[in-house]
Amino acid sequence: MKIVILDGYTENPGDLSWEGFEQLGELTVYDRTSLTDIGEINARIGDAEIVITNKTPIRRETLDACPAIRYIGVLATGYNVVDVEAAKDKGIPVANIPSYGTEAVGQFAIALLLEICHHIGHHDKAVKEGRWASSPDFCFWDYPLIELSGKTMGIIGFGRIGQVTGRIAKAMGMEVIAYDEYPNDSGREIARYVSLDELLAESHVISLHCPLFPSTEGIVNKDSIAKMKDGVIVLNNSRGPLIVEQDLADALNSGKVYAAGLDVASAEPVRGDNPLLTAKNCIITPHISWAPKESRQRLMDIAVDNLRQYLSGSPVNIVNA
Ligand code: NAD
């Protein structure tokens, strides 16, 4: 059985092992595959039965061109790169990794927030440049420093990662409110569920943790921003297209939104003309929330286990059943 991994580098830049997959079939690993050249994607899959992708798109035309495909595994939680409906039409199960990085991604959302509150990177650089040594006072700061205790964190999409983020925010003394289509008991222990409009109006910090669906694409746009508090902070380490980037850039530049912390962009890698690159008070990191080694090892183990379970006839983590 042939297994092809289309874009293995970010999951395993050399500090993990592909041995688990090697034990299950004849494995070919590509570090990267074009995200846009369907011909290259199809040629690399060829007659492989098992396709593993992280961000390489698998569209209907690829499924048409590669009829040997029996199973698609996504090396991520979000599976929007695969046309799951087209796969379902062809009876091809698509498996994701639901929870390998829940703690790390929640931690990173808070890291973005703390950076906005304290600008630790900036102040460290200023100290190394000699500004503290030459300061007339015992301290200096270049940005407003923000205390979070007593402020309200609004979380859109209160699933696994949203709830971890909420738990940490609550531990810092924040009030946590959440909007989710499916409220649950574990969420109620952390947050008060509210409508989307209430969340937009009441939150000092809004953190996005919903998946990218047609219903959530562009959920932060000029209309929803207008409903937010003046000076709100927006965080997104879920998926870039949840935000209409020009609208957020305009709101940052006008001061309506005080700051944004983003680990994702509408196109990745980020395009040089992305308006958020030059927007005021916008911190952008290169989609690294998921990437601590501990999380990637967990991801590897679950991806191998997903395939093993599929091959033994009891598939798990299928998103298009
Ligand atoms: P999850 O399925 O546990 O939670 C998602 C929540 O969003 C669910 O509770 C769901 O009911 C809710 N939701 C769905 N549609 C909604 C809507 N229209 N409005 C409001 N809520 C809605 O998923 P998770 O493990 O918490 O992951 C969330 C997202 O985080 C993933 O889909 C992925 O896009 C992103 N993610 C990013 C990284 C990264 O490195 N930046 C890593 C992992 C996951």
Image: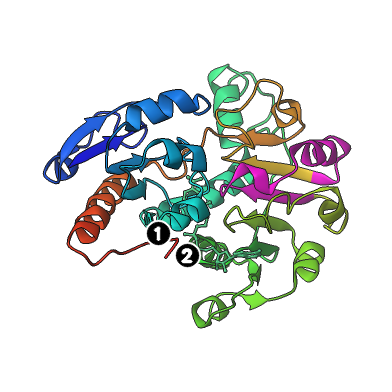
The kind of residue tagged 1 is Pro
Which one is nearer the viewer's eye here, 275 or 104?
A: 275
Q: Is residue 104 left or right of residue 70?
A: right
Gap between marks 1 and 2 measured at Cα: 9 Å
Residue 84 visible to the viewer: yes
Circle 1 sits in a helix, a strand or a loop, which is it?
loop
Q: Quadrant of ligand 1?
A: bottom right
Q: Does the magenta stretch include residue 262?
A: no
Residue 309 spot, x, y in % from top left: 22, 61
Q: Residue at x 42, y 45 (%)?
A: 290
| SS category of the residue bearing label 2 | helix
> Which is more foreground, mark 1 or mark 2?
1
- Name the quadrant of the N terminus: top left
| Residue named by callout 2 | 160
Determine which of the numbered discs, if any, sits on residue 98 in the image.
1
Does residue 163 lie above or below 56 as drawn?
below
Q: Point out the stretch of residues depicted in magenta.
A: 232-257
Label 1 CB-ligand 1 distance < 8 A: yes
Q: How crowded is mark 1: few (under 14 residues within 10 Å), some or many (20 or more)?
A: some
Mark 2 burial class by Cα count in 10 Å: few <14, some 14-19, many 20+: many
